[in-house]
Image (cartoon, rainbow, N blue to C red):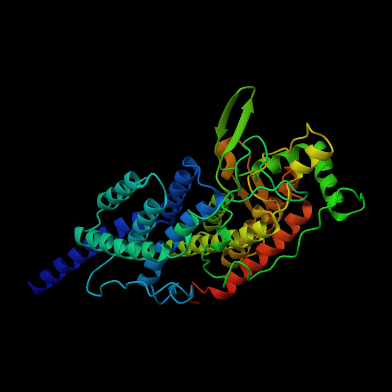
Amino acid sequence: MNRFLLLLAGAALFFASCKKADYQKVTHDPELYRTTVKKLNDIVLENNFPPVIASRNYVYANIAAYQVIAAGDPKHYRSLSGQIKHLPATPQPPKDKEIDFQFASLLSFCFVGNAVTFPEGSMSTYVDDLKEKAKDAGMPSEVFENSVAYSDTVAKYIMKWSKKDNYAQTRSASKYTVKRSDGRWIPTPPMYAQALEPHWGEIRPMVLDSASQVPAPEPPAYNMTDKNSVFYKNVMEVKTWVDSLNTDQKHMADFWDDNAFKLTVVGHASFGTKKFSPGGHWMNIAGTGSIIKKADFSTTVAAYTETSIALFDAFINCWYVKYKANSVRPETVITKLINPDWRPYIQTPPFPEYISGHAVISAAAAEVLTHDFGDNIAYTDSSESEFGIEPRKFPSFRAAAMEAAMSRVYGGIHYKIACQVGNEQGRKIGQLVNEKLQLKIK
């Protein structure tokens, strides 16, 4: 009889563990996290978030998710509290309650994603689907409720912390003053939009001590009277490239365009088209890296988080440099002094030229991804396929970042020096992120 009871108990334990394994196969699948990040990426795209604001959306959502993972597995992952100096200790999970930390991290990501995007609640339907997925997979109700409760606790804590980053204050800050003086940035066609986020350099960074911690050299002095000046040569180099682009160079410029909102004007009609922002593009690349390396759920969350931190700080530093230099775009100089009908291959974005934002953030992200997944990781980037742009192949993340930088010269919106300096600037920022943040315990 006792033996029978033991067998019965063993069978019950076996089936219980099978049931547990079944639902964890769903909630612990790294593809589910990649899908969740892509969902936020789509919302950012649909609502025309500028690249700098998009980086803020990504970073807080990923940090919320990561802090849940670190709390659930402190033997293998370090909390960002303390590593990010101004991030206080995150609330710890109750010791007497079973929590599915992977599921809770997904919900925390979505909670913050819902809060930092508009219209608020854009991810609500997706969250409902996640919850149904967990229930359908057999997650016990107690585990479900505990996981939801803890995810809400962490997400609310991260949201409270996010409100101290000076973002709200910059919403009412003064606008950029347009001055028509030689060498200074002015709005460009076809939108002639006002300068985008001139105070973004005042946003609180994550790892950098300040926006100016990584200084950039001064741009070449404006000089269009001396044909031997560095500035004149830079201008003519852009014009020459754009006037003689080959098929691959055009593909490169289109692939890395990442214009969140492009305005096309035909006669008296106009229409807008949308793509991922540069940060959104690198979020996709982070996902590709996790697939190639067959990273598990927690490693995937950590990689997205570290990449989003690098992107966030890189944008802050870059925007500080941009509005310190206030450099004029090639389009303005060429149409005024050389050919009034000249246009860049891609649309000039509404902010100063020096330094190249795409060069800075791409190099920063590439350093982090190289640190997380390894150097010389060859991959195919199909991020732009949904916009009708063919994939491109790269031998490494760093090679992709270098191409992203050069693509802005082919596009006609940056001088080569702004891209070279930007790439070096981003590399230094990425290295700082790698040095200061130790997410995984080896």
Which of the two residues, 275 or 175, is positioned nearer the viewer here?
Answer: 175
Q: How many marks?
A: 0
Q: Position of residue 338 (x, y in %)?
A: 84, 38
Which of the two residues, 308 or 28, is positioned nearer the viewer here?
Answer: 308
Q: Position of residue 245 (x, y in %)?
A: 79, 38
Q: Position of residue 16 (x, y in %)?
A: 22, 62
Answer with the quarter of the image where residue 193 lies.
Answer: top right
Answer with the quarter of the image where residue 62 lies.
Answer: bottom left
Q: Would residue 121 be found to the left or right of residue 35 on screen?
A: left
Image height check: is 255 above or below 287? Answer: above
Which of the two residues, 1 or 224, is positioned nearer the viewer here?
Answer: 224
Image height check: is 408 above or below 81? Answer: above
Q: Would residue 57 be found to the left or right of residue 381 on screen?
A: left
Q: Would residue 183 be found to the left or right of residue 2 on screen?
A: right
**Residue drawn 56% across the image and 34% down it:** 273
Quarter of the rendering occupied by the N terminus: bottom left
**From this viewpoint, is residue 395 visible?**
no
Q: Position of residue 412 (x, y in %)?
A: 74, 43
**Residue drawn 56% across the image and 73% down it:** 209
